[in-house]
């Protein structure tokens, strides 16, 4: 799958980039980080234009994120409400929704570019929690365009080391997730 | 006398564990797991950085000849010559497609490219 996607990017350029980032933002596991790094390498070789690549990939990601949010909001929330009523946890659900509304913005923003594996889950969770759509869109656009710009720039700078950079960034993302979890759990332990 | 002096220590130790709630024990286990995860991925990052310094970028079937030439700092015409393919302007064909068009296994084409890169680096 990975090979086919990268072949498509190498051969067709922008349309392949747009299609893949859109599907990945919905939640289909596709190698989008590597795709953006390779795009950066193609930009540095003069095959693609930087602003066209960033604009198209950013737009595709935002569209995909809106689909994920919509599934959570209009497809998922009905199911969650039904389950919460069955389990008698409506109060709990309401408390979670309030928390998501309060912390939602930074959560959406950082999951676009810093902890990317969480992105599709945050979209769904924001929809389920009923996080206001316009605010979600604002943080989403900000985070996605910044994220795309960062990864394409990394690809431009390390244009001769794309596979190594992809492996490094993948592990870096999980290291950040683990570190944040350690800090959050440590904080809870100190407070309790 | 000796037995009596040890008793309070043991009781206190059991007391601490007993005093810890189940929730706290789960949190401690989760904290250890998260720290272990950070260390494991941190170590992997360190290895990637070391590999980036000393190892060449591998050749993959999705890469085009100009892309491989760029990542390995050699001229594209040397690589085209090595795989006996006519170069095109703005060539974006992946080497998988080139191999298919030439009725050759991709592994053979990749091997020829690797050899040409090694030869070009050694110089005349």
Image (cartoon, rainbow, N blue to C red):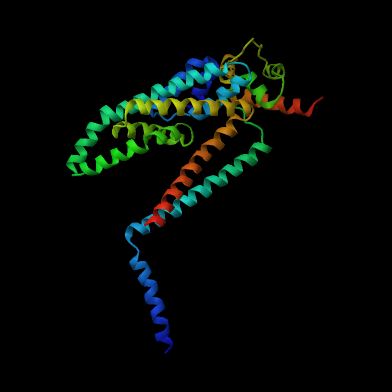
Residue B86 spot, x, y in % from top left: 66, 11
Image quarter hosting the C terminus of chain A: bottom left
- Give the number of callouts: 0
For the residue pair A174 and A104, the one nearer the viewer reads as A104
**Residue A54 or A191: which is nearer the viewer?**
A191
Residue at 27% across, 42% down: A95
Which residue is depicted at the point 78% across and 29% down? B122
Q: Nearer the viewer, residue A163 or B63?
A: A163
> Which residue is outermost to the right?
B124
Res B62 visible = no
Left or right: B16 in relation to A113: left
What residue do we see at 63% from left, 25% from top? B110
Percent position of residue A177, x then y: 46, 42
- Eyeballing the image, is A175 above or below B112? below
B41 shown above or below A65: below
Most distant residue in the bottom direction? B1
Task: Report whether B52 appears left or right of B121.
Answer: left
């Amino acid at each position: 799958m990975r090979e086919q996607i990268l072949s498509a990017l190498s051969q067709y350029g922008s349309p392949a980039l747009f299609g893949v980032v859109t599907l990945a933002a919905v939640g289909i596991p596709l190698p989008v980080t590597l795709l953006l790094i390779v795009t950066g390498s193609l930009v540095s070789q003069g095959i693609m234009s930087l602003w066209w690549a960033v604009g198209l990939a950013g737009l595709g990601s935002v569209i995909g994120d809106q689909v994920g949010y919509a599934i959570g909001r209009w497809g998922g929330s009905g199911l969650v409400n039904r389950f919460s009523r069955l389990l008698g946890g409506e109060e709990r659900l309401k408390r979670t929704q309030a928390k998501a509304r309060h912390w939602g913005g930074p959560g959406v923003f950082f999951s676009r570019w810093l902890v990317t594996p969480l992105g599709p889950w945050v979209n769904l969770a924001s929809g389920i929690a009923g996080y206001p759509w316009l605010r979600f869109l604002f943080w989403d656009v900000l985070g996605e365009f910044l994220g795309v710009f960062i990864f394409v720039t990394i690809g431009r700078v390390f244009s001769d080391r794309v596979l190594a950079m992809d492996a490094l960034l993948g592990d870096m993302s999980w290291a950040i997730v683990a570190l944040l979890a350690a800090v959050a759990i440590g904080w809870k332990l100190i407070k309790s | 006398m000796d037995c009596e002096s040890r008793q309070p220590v043991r009781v206190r130790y059991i007391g601490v564990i007993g005093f810890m709630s189940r929730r706290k024990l789960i949190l401690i286990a989760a904290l250890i797991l998260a720290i272990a995860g950070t260390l494991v991925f941190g170590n992997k990052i360190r290895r990637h950085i070391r590999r980036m310094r000393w190892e060449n970028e591998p050749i993959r079937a999705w890469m085009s000849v100009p892309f491989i030439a760029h990542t390995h700092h050699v001229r594209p015409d040397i690589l085209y010559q090595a795989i006996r393919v006519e170069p095109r302007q703005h060539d974006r064909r992946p080497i998988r497609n080139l191999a298919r068009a030439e009725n050759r296994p991709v592994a053979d084409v990749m091997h020829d490219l690797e050899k040409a890169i090694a030869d070009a680096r050694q110089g005349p």
